[in-house]
């Protein structure tokens, strides 16, 4: 497995080792010991699956308290997956990274606790799954505006289809600071 750090501390792109031949392929999507060696050592407590059509954008979401780390992968189709550092006091507060994840490239993105997450669908449809380190607590969810000009995310879509919740997202600067997670330097 190949692990590539991003500019955001703790956010890593993972390329699992794929064993394939004329019959198809096999890969491990999660192996506790191997991923722990790569820095992904949190316990996952919930798995989610999302199917969306081309042009759908979901996010940017986080919850606080009960912050969630996520291991994201695409089984079918292609998405542009984004993590935004929203931890108060972080040296990379307000910075983002984006990765193209697809059923073809089989890449994964690990997004630790304290980051907002979102994705947009680039193919006709996409089937995306993610493991979470915390259960879903809708009462603590925060939606950050997907096209917040201060974040300047280079989304590969101009006019995505959004949910009412995502249309009503707040610019990061308008989210009350006490609602956002705090940065804790890694030891």
Image (cartoon, rainbow, N blue to C red):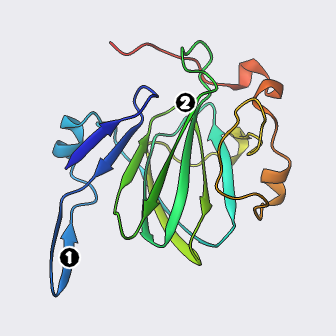
From the viewer's side, name the closer residue of 132 and 97: 97
As displayed, is residue 85 above or below residue 16?
A: above
- x then y, percent, for residue 60: 67, 45
Side of 30 relative to 108 (left or right): left
Secondary-structure class at tag 1? strand
Do callouts 1 and 2 mark residues in contact (Cβ within 8 Å)?
no
As displayed, is residue 71 above or below residue 77?
A: above
From the viewer's side, name the closer residue of 114 and 21: 21
Question: How would you rate the neighbour count of disc 2 (Cα within 10 Å): few for under 14, some for 14-19, many for 20 or more?
Answer: many
Q: Which mark is residue 114?
A: 2
- x then y, percent, for residue 79: 53, 61
- x then y, percent, for residue 93: 60, 21
As displayed, is residue 59 above or below residue 94?
A: below
The residue depicted at 78 percent of the width and 60 percent of the height is 162
| Farthest bottom residue in view | 23
Image quadrant containing the C terminus: top left
The residue depicted at 78 percent of the width and 52 percent of the height is 166
The number of numbered discs placed on residues in the rendered structure image is 2
> Which residue in the structure is indicated by mark 1?
25
As displayed, is residue 181 above or below residue 81?
A: above
| Front position among marks 1 and 2 | 1
The residue depicted at 47 percent of the width and 14 percent of the height is 184
Q: Quadrant of residue 6?
A: top left
């Amino acid at each position: 497995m190949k692990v590539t750090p991003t500019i955001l501390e703790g956010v890593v792109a993972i390329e699992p080792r794929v064993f394939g031949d004329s019959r198809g392929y096999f890969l491990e999507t999660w192996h506790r010991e191997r991923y722990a060696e790569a820095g992904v050592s949190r316990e996952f407590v919930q798995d989610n699956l999302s199917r969306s059509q081309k042009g759908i954008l979901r996010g940017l979401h986080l919850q606080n308290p009960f912050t969630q780390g996520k291991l994201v992968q695409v089984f079918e189709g292609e998405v542009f997956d984004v993590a935004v550092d929203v931890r108060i006091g972080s040296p990379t507060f307000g910075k983002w990274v984006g990765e193209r994840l697809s059923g073809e490239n089989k890449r994964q993105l690990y997004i630790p606790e304290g980051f907002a997450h979102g994705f947009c669908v680039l193919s006709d449809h996409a089937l995306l799954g993610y493991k979470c380190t915390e259960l879903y607590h809708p009462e603590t969810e925060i939606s950050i505006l997907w096209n917040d000009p201060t974040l300047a995310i280079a989304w590969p879509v101009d006019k995505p289809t959004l949910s009412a919740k995502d249309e009503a997202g707040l610019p990061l600067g308008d989210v009350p600071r006490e609602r956002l997670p705090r940065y804790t330097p890694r030891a």
